[in-house]
């Protein structure tokens, strides 16, 4: 088999890249190790920056998003006795849209299917060959048969645990990592969202976040020790703890009910440089991970994919500079979004091992935020997404 671009990984990065390339007439294929149902069952991101919304619309997958997504003009931060409303719209002129990653993925699948674009699910043993040379190819097993795809370029969109990043020789990679001493326990429930907007709550018992997917579906999170397991948390215990971490007037309004999904995700910051090697280009979680506090993971995947799609399109038109500059261009935005995610995480979580000094610093930071339009603007401009 031959395709111009072979994309490894059928998460949002890989599917969006495939759609953007195919819309530009470039023959791209996606290899995904899991089944379609498995990919669609993963509950992940929920906050889309304007940049991602614009890309989805331009790619022809904005219809359901426009009909069903919630536009949020701000968010509420409650911590250290302060209640700070960050008015994105007034401070930056921009908003974010609440629309689940699962729905984005479903829309991308549907659009690719309608175009007859190949997404090969349950591709096993995907291996990259010759990425440093002029004739790269990818081998894998699909439906019981050994397969080979020859291509011009390979896009590594296979997430943090994928094979693409590790294909780049270790001596050429610089990895930067910060592991936080806690995780997020998340539940999805058929209950009304706490408020119209998201509520980020810093509390001495730990961080909490009240988010949503739609008017009848809530997504809530609690900071938990890394040693906790999902089985340790009954629904009752979750709701009780969430109430304790919210200010009383919000705790009173919290609607509770049975969970329909419950999972724990550890938090880390991770960046691998460079994001390209020969004819292999990494995008999304394959190259970097951010803690979810700033809602940046999916949005960073989208900016990578945007840069990469434009660079590949230029390459096929004879302009080689954008593809040569892809890694540096993507990394510049990745570092800024990683800094924001790290600073939001530091400001709002409890770090008991770090003692009272940090807790006081966090208090001072939230107090400063509450009293400074400049500080609120800086937070808002990062939250709605830096331009690309
Ligand atoms: P993904 O989604 O991990 O997809 C990678 C795909 O590659 C496949 N794969 C392989 N395929 C073939 N061969 C192999 N060897 C393969 N190895 C792996 C995998 O099966 C998978 O389908 O990466 P991608 O596409 O780069 O997308 C990144 C986003 O999924 C991620 O950054 C976000 O979900 C992060 N994130 C959030 N991001 C936001 O922007 N806003 C949020 O509100 C937000 N909330 C979150 C989040 C992530 C969370 N978790 C669980 C990590 C909340 C949570 C709880
Ligand atoms: C979510 O709804 O899953 C969500 C929202 C905001 C975040 C992280 C996750 O910062």
Image: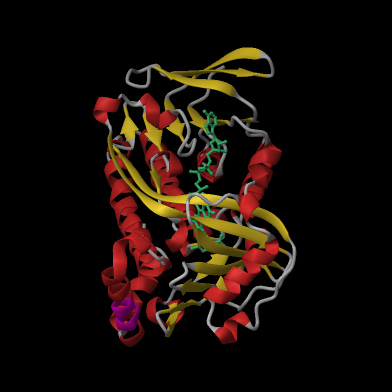
Lateral position of residue 370 relative to residue 41, left or right: left
Q: How is the image coloured?
A: secondary structure
Q: In the displayed structure, would residue 151 be above or below residue 162?
A: above
Tell how many labels. Answer: 0
Tell me what residue is drawn at x 57 percent, y 85 percent.
Answer: 248
Q: Position of residue 332 (x, y in %)?
A: 28, 51
Who is closer to the viewer here, 273 or 371? 371
Q: Which secondary structure class fits the magenta region best?
A: helix
For the N terminus, which image quadrant? Answer: top right
> Toward which corner of the image does residue 146 lie, by quadrant?
top right
Lateral position of residue 123 relative to residue 205, left or right: right
Lateral position of residue 3 relative to residue 381, left or right: right
For the C terminus, which image quadrant? Answer: bottom left
Who is closer to the viewer here, 335 or 317? 335
Residue 256: tell me if it is visible: yes
Q: Position of residue 325 (x, y in %)?
A: 27, 40
Residue located farthest toward the top when viewing the structure as drawn: 146
> Which portion, as a residue range, is magenta?
363-368
Q: Position of residue 19 (x, y in %)?
A: 56, 42
Magenta includes 364?
yes
Q: Position of residue 129 (x, y in %)?
A: 42, 17
Tell me what residue is drawn at x 58 percent, y 49 percent.
Answer: 229
Q: In the displayed structure, would residue 278 be above or below residue 112?
A: above
Tell me what residue is drawn at x 35 percent, y 69 percent.
Answer: 347
Residue 43: tell me if it is visible: no
Lateral position of residue 124 relative to residue 180, left or right: right
Magenta includes 98?
no
Q: In the displayed structure, would residue 29 be above or below residue 307?
A: above
Tell me what residue is drawn at x 45 percent, y 28 percent.
Answer: 163
């Amino acid at each position: 088999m031959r395709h111009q671009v072979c994309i490894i990984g059928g998460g949002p990065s890989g599917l969006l890249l495939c759609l953007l390339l195919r819309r530009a007439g470039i023959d791209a294929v996606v290899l995904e190790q899991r089944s379609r149902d498995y990919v669609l069952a993963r509950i992940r991101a929920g906050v889309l920056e304007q940049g991602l919304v614009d890309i989805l619309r331009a790619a022809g997958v904005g219809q359901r998003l426009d009909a069903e997504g919630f536009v949020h003009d701000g968010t509420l931060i409650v911590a250290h006795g302060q209640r700070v409303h960050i008015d994105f719209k007034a401070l930056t002129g921009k908003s974010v849209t609440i629309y689940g990653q699962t729905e984005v993925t479903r829309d991308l699948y549907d659009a690719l299917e309608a175009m007859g674009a190949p997404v090969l699910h349950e591709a096993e043993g995907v291996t990259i060959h010759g990425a440093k040379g002029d004739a790269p190819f990818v081998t894998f097993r699909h439906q019981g048969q050994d397969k080979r795809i020859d291509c011009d370029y390979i896009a590594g969109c296979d997430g943090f645990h994928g094979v693409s990043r590790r294909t780049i020789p270790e001596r050429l990679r610089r990895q930067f990592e910060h592991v936080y001493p806690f995780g997020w326990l998340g539940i999805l429930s058929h209950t009304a969202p706490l408020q119209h907007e998201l509520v980020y709550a810093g509390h001495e018992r730990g961080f909490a976040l009240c988010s949503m997917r739609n008017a009848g579906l809530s997504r809530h999170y609690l900071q938990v020790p890394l040693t906790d397991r999902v089985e340790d948390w009954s629904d009752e215990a979750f709701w009780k703890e969430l109430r304790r971490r919210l200010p009383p007037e919000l705790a009173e309004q919290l609607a509770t009910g049975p969970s329909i999904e419950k999972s724990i995700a550890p938090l880390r910051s991770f960046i691998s440089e460079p994001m390209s090697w020969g004819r292999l280009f990494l995008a999304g979680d394959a190259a970097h991970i951010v803690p979810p506090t700033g809602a940046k993971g999916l949005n960073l995947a989208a900016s990578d994919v945007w840069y990469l799609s434009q660079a590949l399109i230029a390459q096929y038109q004879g302009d080689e500079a954008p593809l040569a500059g892809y890694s540096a261009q993507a990394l510049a935005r990745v570092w800024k979004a990683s800094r924001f995610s790290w600073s939001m995480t530091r400001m709002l979580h409890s770090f008991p091992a770090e003692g009272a000094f940090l807790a006081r610093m966090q208090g001072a930071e939230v107090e400063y935020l509450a009293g400074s339009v400049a500080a609120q603007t800086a937070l808002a401009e990062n939250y709605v997404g830096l331009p690309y």
